[in-house]
Amino acid sequence: MTRSDYDNAVFYRHHPNGDISILFSHVDDLTLISNETSRIRMLKDKIGAQVEYTDGGEINWLLGVEIKRDRTKHTIMMRQFSYLETILTRYGFKDARPTNTPMDPHLRLSIEQCPTTNDEIAEMSK
């Protein structure tokens, strides 16, 4: 597998038939992804030959992100509802109610409306 140039904890392999396998590592957790189940099994076998591990099955959570897969619709949903609840509670907004946007959502803005003078820029920064 090749280490990602962008994240040292991500490894990938492009297979000759176009399949791809990706391995994410975080502390002592590994996440294996591939568009071919047999490739995941092969990776698990190779890892198992080196170290003992526990297979958590299909992924439901990854680094605080809930993951739900609907195979019939071919969709994957990712959300951070638990994190949002924690932040709202921490900062006293747990019981806050949503409000409408204070601006007309259909209003079209253009570059011509941007401030051009120092006074206009100062006014906008208030």
Image (cartoon, rainbow, N blue to C red):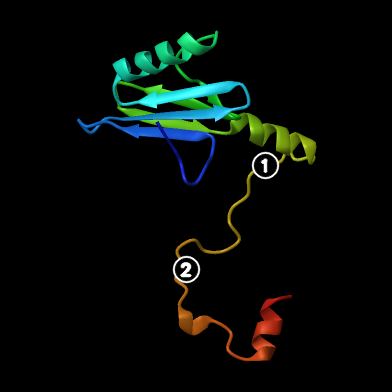
Q: Position of residue 24 (x, y in %)?
A: 50, 30
The residue located at (47%, 80%) in the rendering is 111
- Mark carried by residue 107: 2
What amino acid is at disc 1? Arg
Q: Which mark is residue 97?
A: 1
Say above or below: 27 vs 95.
above
Q: Quadrant of the C terminus?
A: bottom right
Q: Nearer the viewer, residue 61 or 2?
A: 2
- Residue 55: % across, % down: 50, 10
x and y percentages locating residue 49 in the rendered image = 46, 9
Mark 2 vs mark 1, CA separation in Å? 24 Å
Tell which residue pokes out farthest to the front in this image: 50
The answer to whether residue 120 is left or right of residue 50 is right
| Dot 2 alpha-carbon crowd within 10 angstroms: few under 14, some 14 to 19, many 20 or more | few
Provide the secondary structure element on which disc 2 rests. Answer: loop
In which quarter of the view is residue 51 placed? top right
Task: Determine which quarter of the picture holds residue 110.
Answer: bottom left
Q: Tell me if residue 55 comes above or below residue 28 in the rendering.
A: above
- Residue farthest toward the left in the current orientation of the protein: 17
Query: In screen coordinates, is 12 left or right of 124?
Result: left
